Structure formats: C-alpha cells, structure tokens
Image (tube, grey):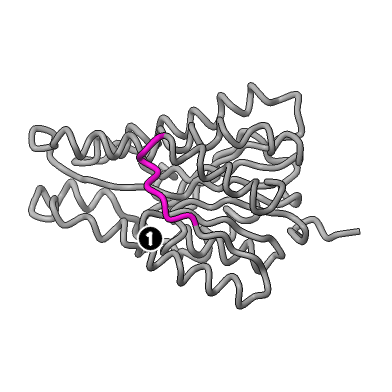
Amino acid sequence: MLAPSDMTGKTALVTGAARGLGQATATRLAQLGADVAIADVDAAALAETAEAIRAMGRKALELPLDLSVRANCGAAVEAALKEFGRLDALCNVAGVMRPSATPEMSDEAWDITMRVNLEAPFFLIRSAIPALLEAGGAIVNVTSCAAYQGQAYFAAYCATKAGLTHMTKALAMEYMKTPLRINAVAPGGMMTQLAQGMGPVMDKDPELLTRLGSLRGMCEIEDVAECVAFLATPAARSYHGACINIDAGITAD
C-alpha cells in the first residue's frame, strides 16, 4: 500500500512555477513522486524548474503560457492531460501584485490583477474538474492573508484573494458529494519576486505599511510549499473547503 503522501504514479499541474512558491511547490510534488506540468509566463525560468524536476527522475511538462489569457487556462489543462493521461492535482499558485494608491491605480493594473489572481484559477478549475473527478484528486488555491486583512494600497489584490478564498469554499460545497478535495492556503509575506513589487508604495504612509508584516518576520517559502503539496496528496483526505493560514500570526487578532 502506498503511503498517504506518496504521489508516485500521479500527476499535478502547478501554475506560477518559474520561481518562488510555485517552483517550490512543483519540486516538492516531484520529490513525492509526481510528474508535473508547470505553467508560467517566464519560459526561461520555467525551464530551470523543469530541469530540477527531471533531475529527480520525474517527468516535467513545460507550459510557457500567459494565464491572463483565458484560452491558455484550458490549453494548459489539455496539454497536461495529453502528456500524462491523467490529472490528480491542480495547484493554482500564480499571482500578481500591483500595489497602488487607489486614485493612481491604472485600468491595466486592475485588470491584470483580476485576470491572473481570480479569473485564471476559475478557468483552470473549470477545465480540470472532469479529470480531477475521475482521479479523485485535489485542487489547492493559493490565496493570501490579504483575504482576511484590509491592507492599504492593496485594494485590487485583497479583492482577488478574498474572492478566491470564497470561491474555494463555494466549490467545496458544490463538490461535497464527490471524492474531489478543494482547499486553499493563505500565506503571509514571503521573500518572493511578488513581494519585491512593493516599490511603488514604499514612499506612502509608513505607519500603514508596517501593518502588513508580522512581528515574527516573513514566512519561509518552503514551509508554505510543504502545505500546498500536502493538500494535493491523499494524505489530506479529510481536508475539504479549508483555508489554512500560514502567516506568522498576522491574522491572529
């Protein structure tokens, strides 16, 4: 009998896998035995993730796609199924952050935040559900502590993460009578390229900006990836409709 966390013979699709949390999640799933389809707009960095997965003896399918384009979401799922013949886990990790004072936020910044953070997970899920139902698999959405905490200069980001969190719960109810498991992970700040996008608001009100962090410091990427990967495995069989906060206590109050 396979150990519950063993992903041998299973496959996963991980978005945002070129670097940061997506990369760490994809490689962790490969360590657990999964073959992994990896999607990201950055083709060069994605190739590095694929190389790391193949070095573990697992298969990697590179999908250099812009998931803000709706058709690419379905294409990613279709390509993964064509390559591997099955899909056991979908990990929606890709995200963008465009902080801005609200009067200064451009239409473009609002639109890309909505398309990548909220719309892409939905259209990926919509395409993947038939295969995931057949496999008795899992969906893991990466939201954020921003889903629970009002954050100055992050109105668009907070809106998408709150929406994705509630979408997770709505889908969990819709598929309550099936073996499909649907959960989310809500990290606090991590030292990723996403966090480095804070530049445009660093000259804003410092008192408001200090509220974004934890007294315990930033979260470790590997810790969050471990949780995402765990929820994708059969070991998380009793988790459904959950959103696990890994934020060093930011949302404890």
Residue 216 locus on image (x, y percent): 39, 62
Picture quadrant where residue 202 is located? bottom left
Residue 250 locus on image (x, y percent): 39, 49
Residue type marked 1: Met
* Residue position for label 1: 190
Give the residue at the far front of this rendering.
82
Picture quadrant where residue 58 is located? bottom right
The secondary structure that dominates the magenta segment is loop
Give the residue at the far bottom of this rendering.
55
Q: Judge left or right: residue 6 versus residue 250.
A: right
Query: Secondary structure beneath disc 1?
Result: loop
Q: In the depicted view, which residue is nearer to us: 65 or 6?
A: 65
**Point 24% across, 40% down: residue:** 154
Q: Judge left or right: residue 252 versus residue 181.
A: left
Q: Judge left or right: residue 72 versus residue 87.
A: left
Residue 162 locus on image (x, y percent): 40, 32
Q: Judge left or right: residue 48 versus residue 176.
A: left
Q: In the depicted view, which residue is nearer to us: 114 or 240?
A: 114
Picture quadrant where residue 40 is located? bottom left
Q: In the depicted view, which residue is nearer to us: 72 or 232?
A: 72
Number of dots carrying numbers:
1
**Point 15% across, 42% down: residue:** 100
Screen quadrant of the C terminus: top left
What range of the chain is rendered magenta? 63-70
